[in-house]
Structures are given as C-alpha cells and as structure tokens.
Amino acid sequence: MMTTARTIAFTLNGQQVSTMIEPHRNLVELLQRFDLFGSRESCGQGLCGCCTVLVDDVAVSGCLYFAVWVDGKSVTTVEHLDADGTLSPVQQAFIEAGAFQCGYCTPGFILMSHQLLKEHPNPSDDDIRHYLSGNLCRCGAYPEIIEAVKLAAKR
Amino acid sequence: MIPFDMVEPASLQEAVSLLDPQEPTIRPVAGGTALMLMMKSGVFQPTRLVCLHRIEPEHARITLVADGALRIGAMATLRQVEKDADVAARLPVLKRAMRTLSNVRVRNVARVGGALAHGDPHMDLPPVLAALGARVAIAGPKQSREMPLEDLYAGYYETVLEKNELITAVMVPALDGRKAAYMKVTSRTADDWPSLGVAVSFAMKNGTISDPVVVVSAATAKVTRMKTAEAALNNAAPDDASLRRAGDAAAEEAEVLSDAHGSAPYKRELLRVYLRRAVRQALDGSAE
C-alpha cells in the first residue's frame, strides 16, 4: 500500500517549519513531534475540546484534522499565547477566576475562549455556553470558566 | 488510524477521476470530521482518500440565485452557512439548526456536501434541507444529475450516489412565506447526536395548513418523509386536535429503530410529541 510520508511546510506559532508526516497522522500527533503537548487527544471524537488548535486562526479539533492538511497554513497552539513573556488576558482571567482544577481541559478552553471573544467581545451567558458547549471539563469548573470569560472580556 | 494513501486533486473533475466506481475503500473526504470517526473506530479502513479541499473555490460559495433560492456549494463549511447573511435573512430555520449542530470546531471544518453524502441518519442538515424542498446537484465522470435531497438516501448510511459521484451543491428554494422548523432531541448533551430529528415546513392559507412536508431523522434508518402525518396536517387548522392526529400518524408510520440514543418505543413517543411542537414552533417562530 502506498502510504508514503510527505514533506509539509507550515507556520507553527510564528515560526516557519517543515517535517515529514504520513497521511494517517492527525494534527495532535504532528504537534507532539514539535514537543507541543498543550493540545491533547482526549475523547478522540471532537466532543471534548482538549485538542483545540487554531489553523489559519480558525479553531479545529486537532484529533479530527489530518496533519498533512496544515501544509502551507498557519498553526497556533496554546503555547504561543504567552510568547511575549506575559500571559494573555484570557489566561490571566482563568487564573484569577480559578477556572480549572486539574487543568487537563484548560488549553482547549483558553483557545476557544480567545475565539469566542473575537466573535463576541461582550458575550452573554448564553453566547458563552453555546460557544463552549463543545468543551468538557470533568472537574466541573464551568461556573468559574464563565466568570473567567467575562473577566477577560472586560480587559 | 491505519495507514492509507491520500491524494489532493486541484479540480472537481480530477477528484471524480481519482474515485473508483468498484472500490469502496477509496472514498472522497471533504471536512473529514465524520469520516475520521469511522476510521478511528475501524469501521472504515480506506486504501486511498481523495481530499476535496484543494478543488476550485467556487464549490465553497453560497450564492443567492435569481428566484430567491440559495445555492450552497458542497465545500461550504457548516460555519459558513451559520454566518451567511442570506441564510440568516431567508432561511432562519437553517441558521438556527446550526447552533446545536455538534460544536464550533466541527462546524468550522465539516462541509455541507460531506454532511449530506455521509448518509448518517443522525445528522441535522439532511432533515432540515429535505423539509425545505432542497435539491442536490451531483457530478460524475460522464454527466451531472440533480435530485430532491429526500431521494438521496437509500438506507442506513446508504445513499444512491455512485462511488465516483460527488455532490457539488445543494439548492434550497425560497421559503416564499412558508413556515418551517426543525427540532431535535438529544439524550445526553445539547449538541449530541440526536435520538430524534423532526423537520416541518408548510404554507398557511386562510388559517389552515397547506402543502405540509414532515421529515423524520435519527429515529429512523434514513431521512424519511412522513406522508400520513402530512395528510393529517393538510388543510387542517393547527389546533391541538389536528396536531395530535398528525403526531399519532407519524408515530404509527415511522419505522423507528432502537440505538444508543434511545429505545424505539421511547423515540416513537418523542416523535408523537415533537412533531406537534415543531409545527407550533414553525407557526410562532419561537427559538425553542
């Protein structure tokens, strides 16, 4: 069977990179090769949001996205949010609101909250609940997460 | 996922030529969100995927055509449909359905054509679009064809598409004053695969329902029109008694299947109730 790895080139967190990857690998697996572990494959079905990655500034489930599809695109992971040495307003708000317990789902929530605030700068509770409905927090920090999003919106 | 070959043709025509009418392990992939689930679970093991994301961008456009109909290119993402101004203004029922259709990330990636061609009866777009009288345009190696969306489905995960045919667009006629609603019932989270989907559309003439279309999904093996429920609604005033008759007719007519989202008797009861609610929602335009 012809399943040759191919070379892809893309922008990863602002840096131009290239690598060899097979067609059956997903985006989470690709990121792991760059020692980026913020995007985690958890449910593996696009339901839980732990694998959230931005591709050309659009949020995707990394576990349901073929790695080779990022060829020529720009990929942003949670690791890039504090690239300038300061936490993003959303990250800061999550800490202040105590919007996590174990932290496993947090990178996904943070990236989705960034996207949410871009689309809804002053989100209602309903906006937040709908936008983040595809992110699961098994510690049940939802009330604090909603508070954190509102806090970040004010900044 | 097990290894496979992947090709990324630059045109629709080339994509069609790379498919094989005899080979079920060669399949087209649009957004891949549904297909990858099948591949991860081992239900589908491709030898080759023909990715459609590099074909001509015109296939991802949503255009308003002359008679007020919308032509939605098969490669338009669900998110494009959700955010399209013409969809919002002319087909609010379609925009509303998007809100609980999976989640933002999946809608960002999943494509209209894939959602229609996959043949999964739990998907939301097929019942909504079928109730709106949508037609699908299909391209094959020799000729193109067109058919009502409701005729696309042959059974559980089965369509009448040949293995080397691709949906290129869906044409949705203008509502033209017709009322429409789609309701779904999920047994776990709001954006889960539904236990039942029910879509209705109808005209109102002098206080009575006229030319109704009732479509059921998820509870049945395929998207199905409920003809006896339609007959019960036709020329009836939308009062409690007629809605009850229509709900009972649908519950009687539908061939309901049990699955992880509910038993057949449970879903039959849901259908009885939610058909009534869908008609009421179509009438008063309420969101829930």
Image (cartoon, coloured by chain):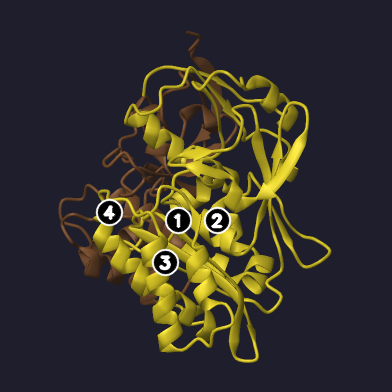
Q: Residues within 10 Å of mark 1 (few under 14, many from 20)?
A: many
- Residue B75 seen in the figure: yes
Chain A palette colour: brown
Residue for badge 2: B79
Q: Nearer the viewer, mark 2 or mark 4?
A: 4
Depth check: give the residue in front, B54 or B236.
B236
Chain assignment, label 3: B
Chain assignment, label 1: B
Q: Amino acid at mark 2?
A: Arg
Colour yellow maps to chain: B
Horizontal side, residue A154 vs residue B127: left or right? left
Q: Is residue A125 above or below residue B223?
A: below
Residue for badge 3: B250
Q: Amino acid at mark 3?
A: Ala
**Closer to the N terminus: mark 2 or mark 3?**
2
Q: Nearer the viewer, mark 1 or mark 3?
A: 3
* Disc marking residue B104: 1
Q: Are marks 2 and 1 on the same chain?
A: yes
Mark 2 secondary-structure assignment: helix
